[in-house]
Amino acid sequence: MIVDCAIYRNGHRTESPQDFSDALAEARARGDSFLWIGLYEPTEKEFDLVTEEFGLHPLAVEDALKAHQRPKLEVYDDSLFVVLKPVTYEPKSDTVASGELMLFIGDSFLVTVRHGEGSPLGSIRRHLEEQHEMLRHGPTGVLYSITDAVVDHYLEVATELGTDLEELEAEVFSPNLGGSRHTASRIYTFKRQVQEFRRATGPLALPMTKLAGLGPFAMDVPFVHEAARPFFRDVNDHLTRVNESVEGLDRLVSDVLAAHLAQTSVRQNDDMRKISAWAAMAAIPTMIAGIYGMNFDHMPELHWLWSYPLVIGTMGLLELVLYRMFKRRGWL
């Protein structure tokens, strides 16, 4: 559905048009105006009117309707298509959830399509309407503001994930909690959250490089003012920091998992050594008692006066020797 629609003239919101075609023609004729339409999870029928009025490419429209796209930037004849994946962090469940945000940018118009809850569009529109300066730059200013807000929120999520990882590290290396049977499950769950975050931030690097005009992928992006490149470079710098943080989190969580598995293996070996040591100590009296429990007629030791205390003493001595030996080697 259409959640908001307005014409912005010289940075100020003026009206909410009923006819998109007339509003777009007026905005193009004035030269200082543009039309911004915001949609939330539109159906194909709802989107048909927008597609017809703005001449959007059918492939981009299909992507906007179906969602589940990677962050990307595609250039068509009459519009620019940008896909972003805003993320939200739920501190109670320690989970990362991603939405999708598609932007169609053309001559004097901007169409935003939102899927999921992880989107900052409402607050961004209000902020832009209060400040006005970015709106004077038309759709380019809006594109910059949206990408800047999305990437800045990435930094906040990366910080939250770093805090969660520190708690996991403390749990793994804590003498009391390191042996929890739920620790491995928590580590795998955290790794899935990092991967979900990575799917949002990693693919965005190439589109931001193009918008910033950097590297071998530098290009003149239509419908985006060349003077905006320094602003997109700033966003690209922040995104680079985010991706470096994500890489660090991914490596560190793998190291934490390896450390936890190593600790588990060591504890299992310790347990096996203890079991083996106690089994060996139990085998000595069992063997001796088994020999003298066979009740053969010709066993001279059975008739000695000191047989019983000698056998008991021998068993006790052997047990003491084994105990001290296993204790010295750290098996007990």
Image (cartoon, rainbow, N blue to C red):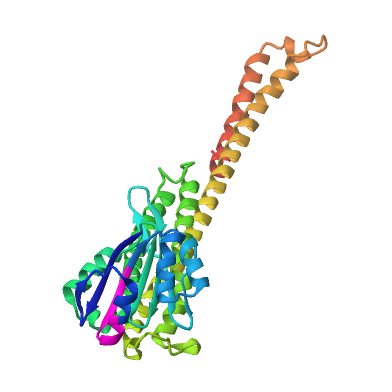
Residue 244 in view in this figure = no
Residue 147: % across, % down: 35, 74
Quarter residue 330 falls in: top right
Residue 231: % across, % down: 31, 83
Which one is in front, 215 or 58?
Answer: 58
Above or below residue 138? Residue 301 is above
Q: Quadrant of the N terminus?
A: bottom left
Q: Residue at x 21, y 67 (%)?
A: 126
Direction from residue 216 to residue 311 in the image, left or right: right
Q: Residue at x 73, y 9 (%)?
A: 303
Per the rendered image, the range of residues in magenta is: 26-37
- Magenta segment: does it hold 33? yes
- Magenta segment: does it hold 250? no
Q: Residue furthest left?
A: 130
Above or below residue 75? Residue 284 is above
Q: Residue furthest right?
A: 298
Direction from residue 215 to residue 27 in the image, left or right: left
Which one is in front, 36 or 136?
Answer: 36
Above or below residue 4? Residue 331 is above
Residue 286: % across, % down: 68, 22
Quarter residue 25 falls in: bottom left
Q: Residue at x 34, y 88 (%)?
A: 225
Residue 199 in view in this figure = yes
Count all numbered tags in the image, as a single digit.
0
Above or below residue 26? Residue 267 is above
Residue 255: % across, % down: 50, 60
Q: Residue at x 46, y 46 (%)?
A: 183
Direction from residue 310 to residue 87 in the image, left or right: left
